Image (spheres, helix red, strand yellow):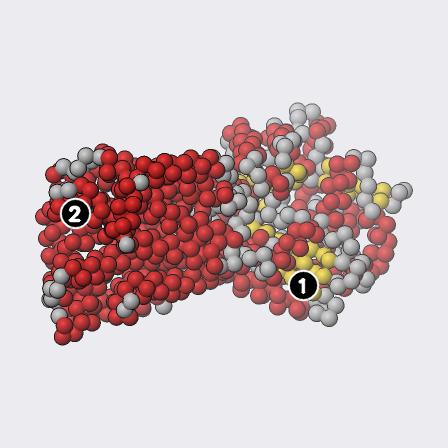
Amino acid sequence: MWEAVARFVLKHKLVLLIALFLVTAFMGWHASKVQMSYEFSRAIPTDNAKYISYQQFRKQFGEDGNMMVIGFQSASLLSDSVFGDFMALNSQVKSIQGVENVLSISSAINLKKDAVTQKLKPENIFKENSIPEQSTLHIAIADSAKNTFFSLPFYKGVLYNAGTNAWLMAVRINKDVLNSKSRSAVVNLVVNAANGFGRTHDIVMHYSGLPLIRTQIADKIKKEMNWFLIGSVVLLSVILLVFFRSISIMILSVSVVLIGVIWSMGTLELMNYKITLLTVLIPTLIVIIGIPNCIYFLNKYHISFNETGNKEAALVSMISKMGVVTLFCNIAAAIGFAVFAFTKSDILKEFGAVAGINIIALFLISFILIPSVLSYLAPPHTRHTKYLDNKWLVAILDKLEIWALDHRKITYGTTLAILAFSIAGIFQLHSVGFIVDDLPKTDPIYRDLKFFEKNFKGVMPLEIIVDTRQKNGLRKNPLRLFAAIDSLSQYIAAQPEMGKPLSIVEGLKFAKQAYYDGDSNNYALPNDFELSFLAPYLNTKSDSASTSNNFTKLLASFMDSSKQKARISVNMADVGSKRLPELLQQIQVKTNQYFDSTKYHVELTGASVTFLEGSSFIIKGLKDSIIWAFALIALCMLYLFRSFRILLCSLIPNIIPLVITAGIMGWVGVPLKPSTVLVFSVALGIAIDITIRFLVNYKQEQKRNEQQQKQLIIETIHTTGISIIYTSMVLIAGFIIFCFSGFGGTQALGWLTSLTLIVATFTNLILLPALLISSLGKKN
């Protein structure tokens, strides 16, 4: 059948080439419209309880992950001209389109009691005339404003840290801007404005918050992947030129993978997907996976041409012999990716579907383009096929043959010893993930995050919702509820990884202090008697709409419109997926202690909780996908070889590399997280093609002659060994390029996949032949 297909391809090559380039033009047009996704990674399925709870929170209270923070240390902020420039910075940032609000010392408000109207009037603490100047009056006003600010415990630990002279500016960015391509421009404008202030006064500025972290990481990865795509094409082009000594062959191979890249980007657009932090890897993976197709086709073409001396006969032999092999190899590689599409995580589904479809498409592209173009090119010269007689590779294959066939006991014993060592390492594996753990500790994003953790205990949002289960429930027996919220808040504030909680209780303390003419000793929860005469004052108003709105919005943000739910907002450190569940469990225990479960329902949510759930969900989904990949690949192998003996012999050499890689991860301390678990499914799908090519060649040789099985295996080692080694070198070189990434996850994908492929090459050229001989028993 495949020989008939080969003759069909060669006969209709011009029509097929025209069709191929028309489809490529169509896909290229769609690829030009693909967009970058600026939304938070959708790792959790939409029917997940924590996802539903988080979306409900966002609907009732707004975004919790749209706050960018600016921090710095200065002992002279409130002196000389520094504060004037800081007030100007506050106004400049607030004027940036897309910025909704700015909270800092320069925009801090105080509440003033108006005994006549019985209202608390919010007013700015620092006004334009409070900027220090040389006049005694201005200095007095400035000192008065400064004393007022430091007398308000509400801001302590939120806007400043007196012990370290650290200051914080919180910038709230519009959620629609954060989900659009303009987010980078807005974040950069904020950073540039703050950097200008820092340069003027020789102050080191620090930036963090989810908007900045997401934006800068997305921009870094997008830029990095562009360079990796170019780097992989250049590197593999050089390797191909060294192997085949032909510019035309190099251009042909590069054309195959570039068309594959165009199709993959077009597929994203056709499926209404955007480029995410995961799908951005697909173009480079297409290049790395596509080049082996070219090598195997060209290797078979050169071998056949050397045997026949006839170009057309060599092309027919290439297509008929390598067509089925390449098809099943691409199917196996596609399975390694496509299994992600069976998970419930949107981001994994998109990655799996697009990668799986386009790896199969790579077969179609190479199957049409390579033989069609070769038929127009001149027959290969001697220098083009010189690599087939590489004495160095032949010597290596001779050594591998000896170890595989003549030293099987030593081979098995060594394998078992390595497996035992690896299994011991697997027990050292642990699963942990941080929001910025893929960044090196020298990266500014990581260093700045640690600045905020040191001075303000972190910036990662955690939200606690207290549901009274009835409308206006916050007004029924409020002091008991507020006392419970205050007790929980004090417990949280005492934790070293968690910042000062903000809630309606802090607003009431602020109001009580204002009622007692700003006496900081009265910053406390009002009792029943105090609340009764304080109540009229809580309906704030001001001559300044902006200050009134600021304080009113602040109070309103801590309860829903129906007055049924109260919100406690906490900023915390990036404690990781191991420590976070422990903290959440401790808080949950305290909520059960402070709140009557028959009257209140307390729920923990926010971006920190969804990150934990998403990280755990991705790891579980990837583990399940590996099982699915094994099962589906096993079915393909069983269909291809129709033998359980061959199936067993084929799976063992591919399980062992995964076990060894997992063991090394355990011994060197590489944790299981989404970026590292991804390696196993990807490596399995790619490594299995070495096995398929070896066994298909073995079966083809078996049908062609009646030699002894041992001699057949020897010939298979030598006929497929060169192309396997060349292909493995290309794959390893392609993945090694990821090791130059600035992200730990991308680095892990590089060196762990390369390690797995190195081990898989040896297990398929040594252990697989040994298993075949042993399984034949007396037949050998």
Between 81 and 46, the one nearer to me in the picture? 46
Between 403 and 417, the one nearer to me in the picture? 403
Q: At x 54% / y 29%, what residue is drawn?
A: 196
Is the residue marked by circle 1 packed among few (<14), some (14-19), or many (20+) residues within 10 Å? some
Q: Residue furthest right?
A: 116
Q: At x 86% / y 53%, what residue is drawn?
A: 533
Image mark for residue 304 = 2
Quarter occupied by residue 412:
bottom left
Disc 1 and disc 2: Cα gap in Å?
73 Å
In primary-sequence order, the first of circles 1 and 2 is 2
Q: At x 55% / y 57%, what residue is drawn?
A: 45
Q: Amino acid at mark 1?
A: Val
Q: Is residue 766 visible?
A: no
Which image quadrant: the N terminus?
A: bottom left
Residue 238, how many percent across, how many down? 24, 37
Image mark for residue 76 = none
Please give left or right for residue 440 compared with residue 701 in the image: right
Residue 250, how many percent across, how many down? 25, 37
Is the residue marked by circle 2 packed among few (<14), some (14-19), or many (20+) residues within 10 Å? some
Quarter occupied by residue 628:
bottom left
Q: Which residue is mark 1?
A: 602
Between 736 and 425, the one nearer to me in the picture? 736
Identify the element where label 1 is drawn. strand
Q: Which of the two marks, 1 or 2, is nearer to us in this view?
A: 2
Please give left or right for residue 140 compared with residue 355 in the image: right
Q: Amino acid at mark 2?
A: Ser
Q: At x 69% / y 25%, what residue is drawn?
A: 135
Identify the element where label 2 is drawn. helix
Between 144 and 646, the one nearer to me in the picture? 646
Residue 640, how many percent across, how many down? 30, 62
